[in-house]
Amino acid sequence: MYNRLDYNLSNESVWLEGGIADTVPDEGFLLAVLNSTPVVDGVPADDLADPVRARAWLASVGGVGTDAELRQVRQVRQVLQAVVRGQQPPDALAPALQGVTRVPALTDGQITWTLSAPPERQLAVRAVLAWDALARHSPGRLRPCANDECRLFLIDRSKANAARWCSMAVCGNRMKARRHYQRFRNAQAG
């Protein structure tokens, strides 16, 4: 299994698990941030709780790896999770974007945009910008797992936009087994 925090942060399409292309820049990074609070063996966990490990991960994905950056990413993660779950409006992300700009440059006849934000805020801002790009490019495709006991998120790439679980092998099978067991118990009781 892959480490939730190992993602390519380039602006190029990359092949993710299952051979599906990353269609929005930084969407793998966005999922890594959102999914950094999993439930492991029934116990909520936080992949960013260990400051040493978290700062090393931040540095490995292009950040500066400071405590200030870690605080910014944790704050944005909390708000992004609430926005995706529908618990807060997208406007709750506005403070993360205060004073942030993108600066254009023309190179070889092409325009490139560079994020301009304090170094300790850049990763948090990138997560918000990835959420925005995904919401615009694929509205309604980013959602929480339908398993109430799971805290992970998914990007639905199915044609029918009907994916419900972060993992069919884990949460999907669990939920189907529960429904089957419930039907079996109800049939025996009735």
Image (cartoon, helix red, strand yellow):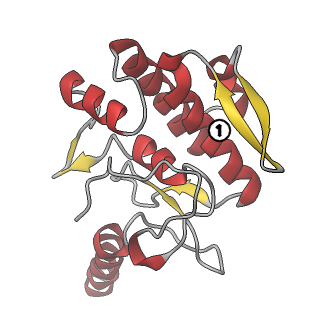
Q: Residue 82: horizontal and vertical position, in percent?
A: 54, 35
Residue 18 sits above or below residue 62 on the image = below
Q: Quadrant of the C terminus?
A: bottom left
Report whether 184 appears left or right of 135. Answer: left
Measured along the vertical axis of the image, is residue 150 above or below residue 156? above
User: Dot 1: few (<14), some (14–19), or many (≥20) neighbours within 10 Å?
Assistant: some
Among the 4 quarters of the image, the one containing residue 64 = top left
Q: Is residue 1 left or right of residue 111?
A: left
Q: Quadrant of residue 36?
A: top left
Residue at the image point whose x is 68% and y is 58% from the top: 140
For the N terminus, the image quarter is: bottom left
Q: Give the percent coordinates (x, y) of residue 164.
A: 50, 68
Q: Position of residue 123 (x, y in %)?
A: 50, 30
Q: Which residue is mark 1?
A: 129
Horizontal relation, residue 170 to residue 73: left or right: left
Residue at image coords 70%, 22%: 94
Above or below for 62 versus 66: below
